[in-house]
Amino acid sequence: MSLELTMLALSVALLLVLVLIQSFAGVQAQGLWPMAGPRDNLGPATTWQLRTLRCVDNHREGLILFAPLALIAAHQDIHTTMTVWGAQLFFYSRVAHAVVYLAGLPYIRPAFWGIGIVGTLMMFLALFGIGA
């Protein structure tokens, strides 16, 4: 498996971990039975529960942009320095972003988000032979 696909698989694993954290936050805030039910009349979400939701949503949005690029690169057998660096920047910045987001650390979270976007743009440009 290429490094780009490995980074994609690890990014999916990160999403799974974040979804589990979000699920536990929901159970912690609302209780097991209300969360197992239809969830029509839940109480207000806690700050932690909302933060985990935003973290999951943010990673999912980034993954929606990155995943097709990694799959196209693999399908077209495009494996360059740009795709490798782009994939690594995306994944490692997303790990850092999640840690910083969940920890509630202000101001540096957008920097990690931006690094992930740069990695995604590198992947995109590499597919068209730009900057390779």
Image: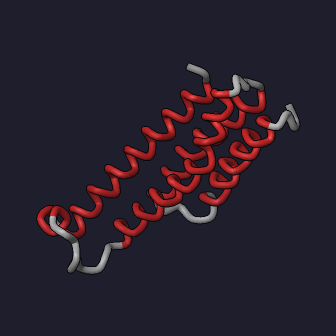
For image coordinates 63% across by 35% down, the residue present is: 70
Quarter occupied by the N terminus: top right
Q: Residue furthest left?
A: 33
Relative to 131, does residue 51 appear above or below in the rendering?
A: below
Question: Which residue shows up at 69% across the image and 48% down it?
Answer: 115
Q: How many marks?
A: 0
x%, y% of residue 47? 37, 72
Q: Left of 109 or right of it: where is 38?
A: left
Residue at position x 63%, y 54% from top? 113
Q: Quadrant of the C terminus?
A: top right
Residue with the most extreme top position: 1
Q: Position of residue 2 (x, y in %)?
A: 60, 21
Which residue is more in the foreground, 38 or 53?
Answer: 38
Horizontally, is 50 left or right of 108 in the view? left
Q: Is residue 15 left or right of residue 129?
A: left
Q: Residue furthest front?
A: 75
List x then y, in percent, for residue 33.
Answer: 11, 65
- Residue 123 locus on image (x, y percent): 72, 39
Q: Nearer the viewer, residue 64 or 30?
A: 64
Q: Is residue 20 left or right of residue 123?
A: left
Query: What residue is at 56 percent from the left and 50 percent from the top?
Result: 64
With respect to residue 54, does 123 lie above or below?
A: above
> Residue 34 lies in what quarter of the image?
bottom left
Residue located farthest toward the right when viewing the structure as drawn: 131
Q: Is residue 63 above or below residue 42?
A: above
Q: How is the image coloured?
A: secondary structure
